[in-house]
Image (cartoon, grey):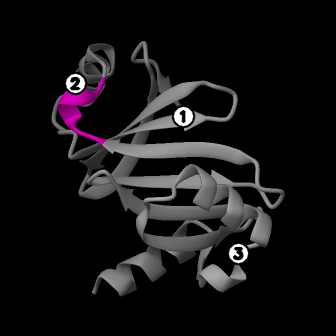
Amino acid sequence: MKKIFLIFTAMLFGTTVINATEVPDAVEKAFKEKYPTAKKVKWEKENNNDYEASFVMDNKEISVVYSQDAQLKEIETEITVAELPKAVIDSFNKKYPTSKIEEAAKIERADKTIVYEAETKINKKEVDLLFDENGTEIK
């Protein structure tokens, strides 16, 4: 069932699940240098030719995105809802008072900006909302 969900998610977001052997050597090398203890690594190729590795490290789910030339573009780390900045939680609660944050993540981008992801259900549909550290929702 989980495999079906991954395939569906990949199709929905314009990614393709691939084998590690399909990842460019430079990308794989950069990944292994930065995350030598990563476990359960799964690779996807995005429509823009970026490569995303999802894995577990230190009991946290993490995903990283690399460009074709092995430049790290983004790191997304699972966090607890309680670890979200108070401003994010307050903003979410004000704008979506009938919803609840079910999962959260911290996203560090290559330009050093940090955004927070709040996964919720709105009208029975799963939605990922992004906020800056001040609680401003990012469209």
Which residue position is annotated with label 3? 23
Q: Secondary structure at mark 3?
A: loop
Helix or strand or loop: what does disc 2 sit on? helix
Q: CA distance from mark 3 to mark 2?
A: 41 Å
Identify which residue, 23 or 4, lies in the foreground.
Answer: 23
Tell me which residue sits at (56%, 72%) in the image. Answer: 43
Vertical side of 135 occupied by 53: above or below: below
Q: What is the CA distance from the residue labelled 1 to the residue labelled 2?
A: 23 Å
Crowding near pointer 1: few (<14 within 10 Å), some, many (20+)? some
Please tell me the numbered disc located at residue 120: none
Residue at left 80%, top 61%? 68
| Pair 3/2: label in front | 3
Is 62 left, or right, of 96 in this rendering? right
The residues colored magenta run 79-84
Residue receiving disc 1: 108
Element marked by disc 1: strand
Amino acid identity at mark 3: Val
Task: Indicate the amino acid at tag 1.
Answer: Glu
Q: Quadrant of the N terminus?
A: bottom left
Q: Which residue is mark 2?
A: 93
